[in-house]
Image (spheres, grey):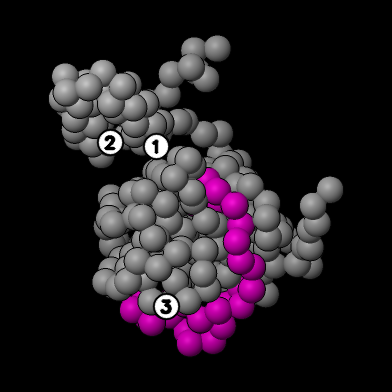
Amino acid sequence: MARYLWMPIHREGWPFIALFAVASALLGLAWAPLGWLGGAATLWCAYFFRNPDRVTPTRAGLVISPADGVVCMVGHAVPPAELGMSSEPRMRVSVFMSVFDVHVNRLPVDGAVTKVAYKPGKFLNASLDKASEDNERLGLRLALADGREIACVQIAGLVARRIKCDITEGRTGRAGERYGLIRFGSRVDVYLPDGVAPLVACGQRMIAGETVLADLDGGESERAGEVR
């Protein structure tokens, strides 16, 4: 029960929580109802920066969701040019995070980080397709043990104004490992290797570090889904 009532807070969140708490106290001194509203906002801020542990499937070949949220797009797209990958379209799975989702991002696969590339841009609604090209973003190029590559791209959204990435080029990471955070509402795109079909459909809810997006060694065709 304690696991559900209390979750760790990401270290990036503590300055914001403190700021919200101080502002709430000052508002409460001015007018008590404002203090209560500020207290609610402080609790939401703590909720936003929660950083729960996850149980990651460890079988080789699985691609794990890097973000909590909802799959908003599945289809072919060209990876960001700054990552230096092929200009041929790849299957892309986009996961949109609302302000109520956990915003800690996790690596989708075991692999070596061969490129970390930041590109400044706009702050359009992250659920829009053009956000992949126009918005501020930070991309990872990951090399797998078998020579194939995957791209994982953090995209800032309408409210998000900062992308945090804690992993550097040359490092080898594990699937499900925490590597970054986007503040307040955003999206993460995963570009799969050629011939790999996603195992998720638009509208499905993802759990970072747990939900399987694709199987690199599987032969299943692309999935479809419907609301029931």
Question: Residue 217 sits in which quadrant?
Answer: bottom right
Q: Is residue 116 above or below residue 176?
A: below
- The residue labelled by disc 1 is 48
Q: Residue at x 33, y 79 (%)?
A: 82
What's the mark number on residue 222?
none
Query: The residue tagged with tag 2: helix, strand or loop?
Result: helix
Q: Residue at x 38, y 76 (%)?
A: 134
Q: Is 215 contained in the magenta span?
A: no
Q: Earlier in the sequence, mark 1 or mark 3?
A: 1
What's the mark number on residue 13?
2
Q: Earlier in the sequence, mark 1 or mark 2?
A: 2
Query: The residue tagged with tag 3: helix, strand or loop?
Result: helix
Query: In the displayed structure, does residue 226 sit left or right of residue 37?
Result: right
Residue 92 location (% of width, % of height): 58, 70
Query: In the displayed structure, does residue 20 sit left or right of residue 69?
Result: left
Q: Residue at x 84, y 48 (%)?
A: 228
Query: The residue tagged with tag 1: helix, strand or loop?
Result: helix
Q: Residues within 10 Å of mark 3 (few under 14, many from 20)?
A: some
Cα separation, mark 1 vs mark 2, equals: 8 Å
Cα separation, mark 1 vs mark 3, equals: 26 Å
Query: In the displayed structure, does residue 212 sit left or right of residue 151?
Result: right
As shown in the figure, which amino acid type bears the numbered disc 3?
Glu
Please give the range of residues in magenta.
65-91
Residue 32 location (% of width, % of height): 26, 18
Q: Is residue 45 above or below residue 172?
A: above
Q: Residues within 10 Å of mark 1 (few under 14, many from 20)?
A: many
As shown in the figure, which amino acid type bears the numbered disc 1?
Phe
Q: Is residue 35 visible?
A: yes
